[in-house]
Every structure is written in structure tokens, then in C-alpha cells.
Amino acid sequence: MSLVERDLAVIWHPYTQMKTAQPPIPIVRGEGTCLFGEDGKKYIDAISSWWVNIHGHSHPYIAKKIAEQLTVLEHAIFAGFTHPWAVELAERLLAILPSNQAKAFYSDNGSTAIEVAIKMCLQYWHNKGEQRTKILAFKNAYHGDTFGAMSVSGRSAFTAAFDSLLFEVEFIDLPNAGNIEELKSQISNLKSHISSFIFEPLVQGSAGMIMYEAEYLNELMAHCKKEGVLMIDDEVFTGFGRTGKSFACDHVQVQPDIMCFSKGLTGGTMAFGLTTCTQQMYDAFLSDDKMKTLFHGHSYTANPVACAAALASLDLFLEPSTKANIDRIINKHQAFAEKITGHRSLKTTRQTGTILAMEWETGDNTSYFSGLRDKLYHYFLDAGIILRPLGNVIYILPPYCITDAELDYIYSVIEKALDEI
Ligand SMILES: *Cc1c(COP(=O)(O)O)cnc(C)c1O
């Protein structure tokens, strides 16, 4: 049996209608920006493998650190015990996060990092004896697939089967010059019930790379601060350089109370999650009363191998060449966006840092499930490029080691697609 036949016999894939989906493409090796199929075909990974990879595939330095770690300590229970790698990682990350971030809570993926953040906020008010149980979120938000994370995400086709079971959330529009005052008064009206405001900073990834301005996020955050609403900054996607700065919140002045990380945290090598918070949040759980404890933890909390992977990825991230690569990608994206602006097949282009999104003109069918999406997806696959359109939006967010030649090739295939599709 081929690998694909064996796969179809035993595997259920994520976000996949198994009845109608094309068979999965077997990938057997990764190197730098590229993934290699079983048949030897080379694919440029233009989307960093579901947005997780930042330094390239099978990076030898991260691989070496992970291999070494496995021979020293592979796992240790993290309640009642600690280990050097968890401590060092927290020390080094907190040193580069906004100065108010003081404590690190580990988990094992983006959704769990969000669950922890939500529970921290809800219990913060509970411990203080205040009835603040509502959460504020942006329309079309995406914060993950577990129930809490799904609840604070926009209601959509993906949540429809569960909508009646999700807890109620106040959804507001993304801020802009026209609505910012209205949004602020909405928050003021609700503030006595609102525990926290959760947001994807600057870019709503899953919604279709929808972008908004740092200036208005900053204004909204300043208002939340004034009204005593806690802020959860979901940097699961935007963290570690994606937006051009180390973290998206580095584009604003107001500091969030809680931050969530996953995806790029280990350079895309190991499943890992991290939630950080301020000293003030942490202090609200300190008590002689055991009922004020944060009763949350996962079996793999602070797994040493994941910590070692994150430490190695951080070493690479802090090398000056990484920042230079990020700036290089930003400049090349900008030049390409200018070049294709106005093309008749293109509705708009938008860019935040290393993320470049292009919205195809569609006529009337704009849904995620439109035929256009599949056409684009296979067009790029045939050309040896992995792009995974969100409906009629295609986007490039490459590992930072991508070469100019690889970027130019991707751009040229996009131009061709614009002419032909
Ligand atoms: C991917 C993502 C999540 C969820 O992370 P998982 O590891 O897939 O559970 C949460 N928030 C944002 C902004 C994301 O992009």
C-alpha cells in the first residue's frame, strides 16, 4: 500500500472534509524554506507550515539542541518541581517582552495558551470578589479551537455546530478613525461586567489576514486601561517577528496585562504554549485560601524538550541576521505589492511586516468554500509553492530564511496566476 492509502485507512485530518478532499500530499523531508514530497517534488513553504516556522525546516542548530536535551532530561512533572530550561526560557523571554510582563505559565499549544489567559482573567475578578464575567472580543476573531478559545472567536461556519454551547461574548468592530469614539463608549457602558478584552494585535490571521492600524489599537487599549478592563494580547500568530517587530504589541505604547504565544515559539519544531502576565495579575492569586489557586495544568506543561527548542529558536531569533532578513522580506513585499496594485484580478493588497495578503476579485462568490480557493491552491501547488488561500485571499508569510530568488519565484507565479485565473 502507498503512504496515501495507508493514511486514508487510519487518519482523520484537521479542517478537512474527508469525503471530498483530494488525497493528502506525502512530505518526507524539510530543509530551509522547502518541503520535499515522497516523489521527490520540491515545495517552497510560503506559509511557514501553518504559520509556525520562522528559521526554516529541520534547522540543524535547533535539531542539535533538541537531540542533546533528549539525552539529559526529556520530561519532568512541573507541579512541585522545576528545571533549568523552563526557568531560563522564562527569564530570557520576559526580558524582551513589554516591561510589565512578570510571570510565565506554560502549556502546549496556542488554544491552551488562550484558555489559560481567559481563566486567569475570569478568576482574577472572582478572587477579588467582583462579578465581571463577560469577555470582549473583535468580530471575526480567531483564538483557537478548544471551547473557551472558540467562545471568544467569531461565530462562523466553523463554530456553527457548537454555537448554542459557547459562552456569550461581546463582539466589537475593529477600530478605525471613524468608529473609535463609538467603540470607547461601548466599552464604557459595559465595563462593570467585562473581565477582559482579547484581541489579535494588528492582524486577524484566520479571518483572512484582515489588518488594522496600531494607532487605533493603542487608543482602544488606553481606554481599556482607564476603565480597568484587563487586556489579553494574543500573539500566537504575530509573535516572534511576523509584524516586523519582535511582537506586534511593540507597535503600540500601552502594555497588555496578558500575552499568549505558541506557533513561532519553538521556531515551528515542537508543540508548545506560553501565557505571560503582570505581577498584579499574579498577586491576585496569592492567598492562604487554597480556593484562590489557579487550578490549571497540562501533562506536558513546560516540557524540557519544548523549552530547549524554544531556547534554541530564541538564540537564532536574536541574531542580527534574523532582523536583517525580516527587513529584507518587508522591503521586497512592499515593492511587489506596489507592482501588482491595480491589476484587474486583484481587489486589494495589504501588508503588515512579513505578511503580504492579496484579495482576489471574485464577482459574487466570496465564501471560504468558493471554487476559486481550490483553483488557486492547486495552481500554486503545481508550481511547487505551498500557499493555502483563505477563501479568495492568498497570503505569503515565509520562514525568514527565504532567499530573494525564492521570493521572486513566488511573486512571478502570483503574477502569472493574476493573469490566468
Ligand atoms: C493559531 C492561532 C491560535 C490557536 O493556536 P493552536 O496552536 O492552533 O491551538 C490562537 N490564536 C491565534 C491568533 C492563532 O493564529
Image (cartoon, rainbow, N blue to C red):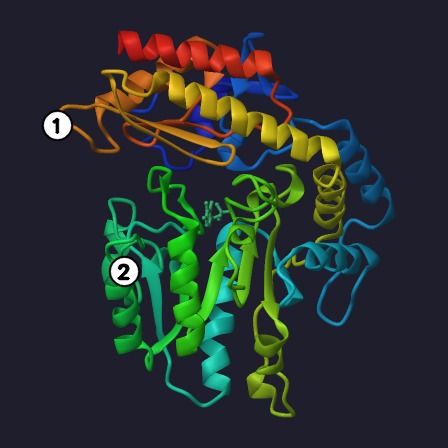
Callouts 2 and 1 close, C-beta under 8 Å: no
What amino acid is found at the position of numbered circle 1 in the picture? Asp
Between 5 and 138, the one lying in front of the other is 138
Q: Is residue 374 above or below residue 85?
A: above
What amino acid is found at the position of numbered circle 2 in the picture? Ile
Q: Quadrant of the C terminus?
A: top left
Q: Is residue 395 above or below residue 257?
A: above
User: Where in the figure is residue 136, as x and y percent of width and height?
Assistant: 34, 66
Q: Secondary structure at mark 1?
A: loop
- Going 40% across and 41% down the picture, which residue do you hit? 205
Measured in 3D between alpha carbons, the distance from the residue under mark 2 to the one under mark 1, in whole angstroms, is 26 Å
In the current view of this chain or complex, which residue is farthest to the left? 364
Left/right placement of residue 107 relative to residue 370 reads right
Left/right placement of residue 218 relative to residue 183 reads right
The label shown at residue 364 is 1
Residue at which label 2 appears? 172
The answer to whether residue 367 is seen in the rendering is yes
User: Where in the figure is residue 209, as x and y percent of width and height?
Assistant: 37, 38
Neighbor class of circle 2 (other Cα within 10 Å; few <14, some 14-19, many 20+) is some
Looking at mark 2, is its residue's CB closer than 8 Å to ligand 1? no
Q: Is residue 182 above or below residue 243?
A: below
Between 367 and 270, the one lying in front of the other is 367
User: Where in the figure is residue 390, as x and y percent of width and height?
Assistant: 33, 32
Between 410 and 308, the one lying in front of the other is 410
Foreground: disc 2 or disc 1: 2
Give the mark, 2 or 1, whose residue is nearer the N terminus: 2
- Going 48% across and 78% down the picture, which residue do you hit? 123
